[in-house]
Image: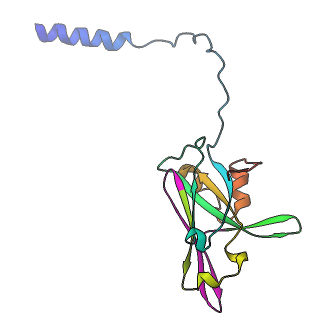
Amino acid sequence: MKKRYTLILLALILISCEGPVGPPGPPGLPGQDGTGLLGQVFEVVADLNAGTNFEYFVEIPSDIEVFESDVIMVYRLMDVFEGSDIWEPLPQTIFRDSGILLYGFDYTLFDVRLFLDGDADFGRLDRDYTDGLIYRIAIIPADFAKDIDVKKMSKVMEVLKIKDVKRVN
């Protein structure tokens, strides 16, 4: 008898859940628009010479939050042609008569290390290769990095909707 009452009670519960959908509730308060991508780009000027041991550490500004999943890309200003900047992504290898010169970088969630590597005699390099180098550091959310041509700084800036780049040093 208990089984019969249990089955009847279960059937009533299942049947009572059917019916037309009620009217929608009142609309909520308007919220703020989303900011879209959280990617950031900032610029630094670095000297990679004997005085800095051919490396330069850049602290990521405190107003930029970097997540484990983010992708960090670094670009070096190579030239300016007809008023347009020419940015090259790192790592970048330059072959010289005196040897190979590599501009590289590595990073943590808090800083980026820019450095020279290769078999060239760094101490004999012209200052154009070591002093006053301009870099842009882009922090790109991982979900969007796969959709961006990260080899082109202009595409990164376009997708991240960045117009002005802040220089941090």
Rendered position, 23 above or below 57: above
* Quarter residue 27 falls in: top right
Does 108 appear in magenta?
yes
Q: Secondary structure of the magenta portion, mostly?
A: strand
Coordinates of residue 7 in the picture (x, y in percent)? 20, 13
Foreground of the two, 1 or 39: 39
Residue most extreme to the front: 51
> Does the rendering let one see residue 91?
no
Residue sitting at 53 percent across and 47 percent down? 66
Coordinates of residue 100 in the picture (x, y in percent)? 59, 85
Residue sitting at 64 percent across and 85 percent down? 124
* Quarter residue 125 falls in: bottom right
Coordinates of residue 102 in the picture (x, y in percent)? 59, 77
Residue most extreme to the right: 82
Does 141 appear in magenta?
no
Foreground of the two, 153 or 16: 153
- Range of residues picked out in magenta: 89-111
Residue sitting at 60 percent across and 81 percent down? 122
> Does the rendering let one see residue 85?
yes
